[in-house]
Image (cartoon, grey):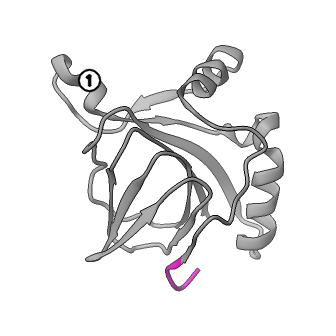
Amino acid sequence: MENIFFKKDLIKFKQPIDFNYVSKLLNNNNLNSYLQNEWSNQYVLNSTFRISNIQDNNDFLELFDYLNQNYNKENIRSNLYFFLSFKLGSTGITHFDNYDVIIIGAYGETIYNLEGKEYRVCVGDLLKIPKYVKHTAISMTPRIVLSYGKYN
């Protein structure tokens, strides 16, 4: 992925993904979850949360295969994560990844600022972020996104 690519309403989910869905996913699977940024204990729900390695869940096998077939021609290692925020204005840490990332909107709206250009990611939208492109995610509503990464 050499260039940023943004496509509206590309991905169709078989069932809606919302916070109830995420709760059931966590209850029925042995998935790791993390706080992505540092908030004080009084405001922990202002944080962004990550749920790792959902690619092995039956609900995401087809999507993961699609992403590998279409965006992983090198057939290198890849994974699929959830990122979620409960509160408007929650932000991820401005950073860059040393591997290509694909963001897929699953719930709500998120603005991604990629080196000064903004992309509004909603349900079904796909945003490809090439490695080493600095980016920040900002929740415009409570939000859930999937993040597909491929790396060596």
Asked whether, in this view, residue 131 is left or right of residue 76, the answer is left
Q: Quadrant of residue 17?
A: top right
Task: Identify the residue at horizontal 51%, vertical 56% (top origin).
Answer: 122
Type of the residue with mark 1: Val
**Quadrant for the C terminus in the image:** bottom right
Locate residue 15, reporting x and y percent: 74, 38
Q: Is residue 87 magenta?
A: no
Q: Is residue 51 above or below residue 29?
A: below
Q: Main secondary structure of the magenta part?
A: loop
Q: Residue furthest bottom?
A: 2
Residue located beneath label 1 in the image: 44
Q: Is residue 45 above or below residue 68?
A: above
For label 1, count other residues whose C-alpha is less than 10 Å away and answer few (under 14), some (14-19) or many (20+): few
Label 1 secondary element: helix
Asked whether, in this view, residue 32 is left or right of residue 43, the answer is right
Q: Is residue 51 above or below residue 147?
A: above
Task: Identify the residue at horizontal 20%, vertical 30% (top origin).
Answer: 39
| Span highlighted in magenta in the image | 1-5
Locate residue 150, reporting x and y percent: 62, 62
